[in-house]
Amino acid sequence: MEARFFSAALIAASLLSLGASHRTQNFIVSAPTPEVARAIGEAGETYRRDLALEWLGRELPPWQDPCPIRVHVGAHLGAGGATSFMFDRGRPFGWQMTIQGSYERLMDSVLPHEILHMIFATHFGRPLPRWADEGAATSVEHTSEKTKQSHLLVNFLTTGRGIAFNQMFAMKEYPDDILPLYSQGFSLARFLIAQGGKRKFVDFVGDGMNWNNWTAAINQHYGYQSLSELQVTWLDWVRQGSPHLDPQSPLLARQNQVPESASGIQLAAASGTASEPVPVRNAVASGGAGSWYARQRDMAHASRVPGSSADAPLDLRSSPPAASDAVQPLIPSSLTRPQEPGTMQPTVIQWQSSAPPLVALPAYGYH
């Protein structure tokens, strides 16, 4: 315990030596100027309150240990951040955050992204699945950042870099090809949130983790019979340009649809093996011979090897390729999965946009 207090004091002292500092109830901000430090601290408290109300329906109690925030601000810096902490019997502690970017992106994207990670860590008391944590956090960024992710998603899905849902939902670590996880996680989070709101999404994620059965959770909260059905419906929504959804959308009217005999994209059951594909339902009312789904089905039949797994990367090759927006991952591929509750190894959450690289980030982490 004394070591923890000494460490916190050492962190605070080092932050004070870096520039102007501003203290709020839950944050200790170190920034190049007093004005920036104060603005980041006050915005942090506002995001902490408003995002908790929006996603959880309640404010969080003050953290026992304030979170030190180191701020690097400059128009030449790519937007990004890293937040580290540890879990002790379901309680996160030992917060540390580093953020960088232009002042605008810090205030409207990086800071809310990182703080939502912290809110989720406090609420759930353990690490979330990477797609859900990053998808939700990306959804609170500025429109320009979300638009970038939407454009990248189409590129990834048309170049064989998509992640099949039975793989994505089971991921406990970042994949080597990490950027598709961000784009796909954001898109799926947006798709689900449109069908019931943010609090329902939080309840769904919590039940999925508690039950260790994502098929049951997606059926309970959203009515999909399987991850396969969810994937097919989501893919069609992406193919249509990810339009605004409402409860009466034909895309979501699945109860009167007839199952197809096969589909171009099929998944194994979340709690089963990946050796046998699970039948999925057509996500559109009309599925004639010239439909996108029919083309995907025919492609799958033509290329399937008997006995092979059905969890291949997602693909939207029938859609025109997007402009060359794809970027090489700037995030180290050796990032570690945050530790389970009760362990004392540090958890790090990081995030960055396309360029340039972050400065002074921890050696381990996830965005």
Image (cartoon, rainbow, N blue to C red):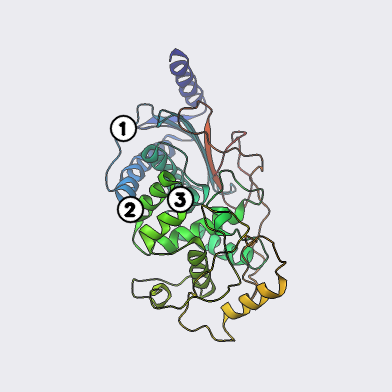
The structure residue drawn at horizontal position 49% and vertical position 67%, both measured from the top left corner, is 229
Residue at the farthest left position:
58
Query: As displayed, is residue 343 above or below residue 165?
Result: above
Q: Is residue 321 left or right of residue 60?
A: right
Q: Which residue is mark 3?
A: 213
The disc label shown at residue 199, or none: 2
The secondary structure type at the circle numbered 2 is: helix
Query: Separation of disc 2 and disc 3 at Cα?
Result: 19 Å
In contact (CB < 8 Å): disc 1 and disc 2: no
Mark 3 or mark 1, which is nearer to you? 3
User: Is any atom of residue 337 visible in this view?
Assistant: yes
The structure residue drawn at horizontal position 60% and vertical position 58%, both measured from the top left corner, is 163
Q: Of callouts 3 and 1, which one flags the residue occurring earlier in the amino acid sequence?
A: 1
Q: Quadrant of the N terminus?
A: top left
The secondary structure type at the circle numbered 3 is: loop
Mark 1 or mark 2, which is nearer to you? 2
Question: Which of the pair 72/339 is nearer the observer?
Answer: 339
Query: As displayed, is residue 80 above or below residue 125?
Result: below
Question: Which of the pair 296/302 is nearer the observer?
Answer: 302
Q: Position of residue 115 (x, y in %)?
A: 42, 42
Query: Separation of disc 3 and disc 1 at Cα?
Result: 33 Å
Q: Quadrant of the C terminus?
A: top right
User: Is any atom of residue 319 visible in this view?
Assistant: no
Q: Of callouts 1 and 2, which one flags the residue occurring earlier in the amino acid sequence?
A: 1
Q: Which residue is mark 1?
A: 62
* Amino acid type of the residue that numbered disc 1 sits on in the rendered structure: Pro
Q: Is residue 237 left or right of residue 157?
A: left
Query: Separation of disc 1 and disc 2 at Cα?
Result: 21 Å
Residue at the farthest bottom position:
289
* Amino acid type of the residue that numbered disc 3 sits on in the rendered structure: Asn
